[in-house]
Image (spheres, helix red, strand yellow):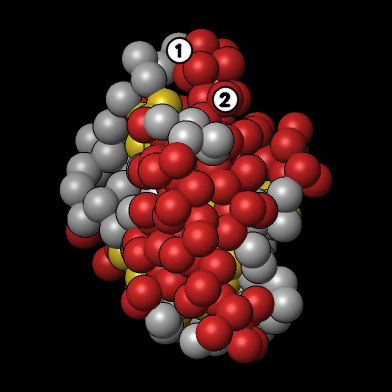
């Protein structure tokens, strides 16, 4: 499902969001620095992420980085349950990209979201096998197993770390493919979400420069 084209060169992100909002079939689900997320009233199972419709005006790297992540998910999405399911992409506009993906929910347990963020940071800085990363994984496993029984059946700290490792190792390839200076892992607690079955998902893992 595609949002009507309303984008012109260098148009402010506030204008993009206000134009989409005029169509009452679309409900705004959230907005970050680089993107806004919209759900069509007739399709609660998917959302459309508009990159270039966030809190700041778009940069070319935002668009390229978003396309790079979709490309990554096509190539590597089967390697981890913690990558989002992509249903489609529209790149007709030169400044904005629209991505249709599965609907994801916030992780309401702040400690678990922070635990995932700590693992991501340690994988990026030290690697999966470093003792600091192992400590972070042990901490998250304790949270999953002792404080949140609903989430433990679909997640483990080791699988979260493996997903982060796949993202780190493949980022240089997609940065080069899309002529980006760098794709940096940016999995702070707010960029981790979950499916309805409680599987944790790295919803927005890269920051593109």
The image quadrant that residue 139 belongs to is bottom left
Q: Residues within 10 Å of mark 1 (few under 14, many from 20)?
A: few
Q: Work out whether residue 75 or residue 5 is closer to the camera in this orientation and state it.
A: 75
Q: Is residue 79 visible?
A: yes
Mark 1 or mark 2, earlier in chain: 2
Q: Position of residue 21 (x, y in %)?
A: 36, 73
Q: Which numbered tag is attached to residue 179?
A: 1
Residue 143 vertical position relative to residue 11 in the rendered view, above or below: below
Residue 84 vertical position relative to residue 139 in the rendered view, above or below: above
On screen, residue 3 versus residue 76, left or right, reads: left
**Element type at marker 2?**
helix
**Element type at marker 1?**
loop
Q: Position of residue 8 (x, y in %)?
A: 32, 40
Residue at (75, 33) in percent of width and height: 75
Q: Work out whether residue 198 or residue 131 is closer to the camera in this orientation and state it.
A: 131
Residue at (51, 56) in percent of width and height: 137
Residue at (21, 43) in percent of width and height: 57
The image quadrant that residue 201 belongs to is bottom right
Q: Position of residue 200 (x, y in %)?
A: 58, 66
Q: Which numbered tag is attached to residue 6?
A: none
Q: Which numbered tag is attached to residue 169?
A: 2
Residue 65 vertical position relative to residue 15 in the rendered view, above or below: above
Q: Work out whether residue 145 or residue 35 is closer to the camera in this orientation and state it.
A: 145
Residue 107 vertical position relative to residue 15 in the rendered view, above or below: below
């Amino acid at each position: 499902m595609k949002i009507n084209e309303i984008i012109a060169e260098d148009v402010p992100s506030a204008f993009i969001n206000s134009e989409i909002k005029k169509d009452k079939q679309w409900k705004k689900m959230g907005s970050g620095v680089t993107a806004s997320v919209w759900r069509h009233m007739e399709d609660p199972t998917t959302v459309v992420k508009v990159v270039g419709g966030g809190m700041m005006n778009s940069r070319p790297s935002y668009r390229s980085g978003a396309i790079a992540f979709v490309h990554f998910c096509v190539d590597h999405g089967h390697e981890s349950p913690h990558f989002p399911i992509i249903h489609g992409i529209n790149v007709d506009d030169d400044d904005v990209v629209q991505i249709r993906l599965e609907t994801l929910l916030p992780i309401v347990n702040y400690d678990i979201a922070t635990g995932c963020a700590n693992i991501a940071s340690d994988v990026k800085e030290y690697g999966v096998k470093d003792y600091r990363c192992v400590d972070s994984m042990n901490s998250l496993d304790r949270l999953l197993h002792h404080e949140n029984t609903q989430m433990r059946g679909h997640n483990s700290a080791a699988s979260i770390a493996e997903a982060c490792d796949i993202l780190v190792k493949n980022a240089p390839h997609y940065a080069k493919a899309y002529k980006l200076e760098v794709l940096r892992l940016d999995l702070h607690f707010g960029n981790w979400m979950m499916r309805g079955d409680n599987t944790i998902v790295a919803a927005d893992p890269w920051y593109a420069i």
